[in-house]
Amino acid sequence: PDVHLVGDEYYLYYSVSTFGSQNSAIGLTRSSIMDIGTWTDYGNTGVTSTSAKSYNAIDPNLIDVDGTFYLNFGSYWQDIYQVEMKSSPTKSSGSSSQIAFTSDYEVLEGSYMFQYGDYYYLFLSKGQCCSYDTSKPASGKEYRILVCRSSFATGNFVDQDGIACTNGGGTIVLESHDEVYGPGGQGVYDDPTYGPIMYYHYVNTTIGYADGDKRFGWNYLDFSSGWPTV
């Protein structure tokens, strides 16, 4: 799920899907205080997919660009797409466009867009996310976190080498190291005291590789070079 304060209400976008298929939809529920029992479900946002689509409508992420809302989404298939939302972002208002794609037989998903300074940063999870205990991928093919950036929220994202994010681009922000394995599913919180913090899930190799063993991690992000580093 992805939650944002819109006006005086919290908008929480969620995925409904059959695992491993494109039979998916993104829904919305709202609350003024985020407490259990206070959420009102508004159902389908209009962002859906079937096998006839080039994308899979899960992993929603909303961004407000000077009062215009966009929803980023996608997993597997043709990777990451974006659609403009209505002025009250309960429904989509147009057709979607691709903003990130990898052609190296891996996968992108879990996109998260974050504005910092003059750029919009598109964080992505790449690789195999799950089932490490039963189907461990080749070294380096497990989840890792990449980033591309653009002066515009709606496209033209490139990595640090200038490779387009729609053509396999993506600069590593965080990958497996030491006891941390397969970090991904990331988001960014701009803390008023400590600045941008990236949060994610990962496997601690000293605990176990099963999905139920995953841990919550976070790192400060340093943007001093123009690119986020941990």
Image: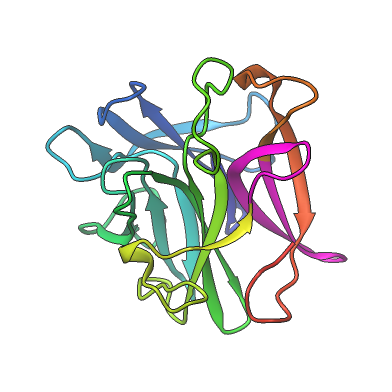
Residue 76 placed where, x, y %?
A: 33, 40
Residue 129 placed where, x, y %?
A: 51, 33
Tell me the magenta residue range: 175-200
Residue 116 placed where, x, y %?
A: 63, 75
Q: Residue at x 22, y 59 (%)?
A: 94
Q: Residue furthest top?
A: 134
Please, is residue 194 above or below residue 219 in the view? Answer: below
Residue 34 seen from this side: no
How has the structure been colored for display? Answer: rainbow
Q: Nearer the viewer, residue 213 or 196?
A: 213
- Looking at the rendered structure, the number of numbered marks drawn on it comes to 0
Q: Nearer the viewer, residue 175 or 157?
A: 175
Q: Nearer the viewer, residue 12 or 159?
A: 159
Left or right? Give the position of 47 relative to 192. left
Q: Residue furthest left?
A: 52
Q: Nearer the viewer, residue 143 or 26?
A: 143
Q: Is residue 33 magenta?
A: no
Residue 18 placed where, x, y %?
A: 33, 21
Please, is residue 108 above or below residue 134 in the view? Answer: below
Most common secondary structure along the magenta stretch = strand
Q: Is residue 198 magenta?
A: yes
Residue 30 seen from this side: yes
Left or right? Give the position of 68 relative to 142. left
Q: Residue at x 31, y 65 (%)?
A: 167
Q: Residue furthest right?
A: 193
Of the 4 image quadrants, the one containing the C terminus is bottom right
Left or right? Give the position of 186 relative to 76. right
Q: Residue at x 43, y 74 (%)?
A: 158
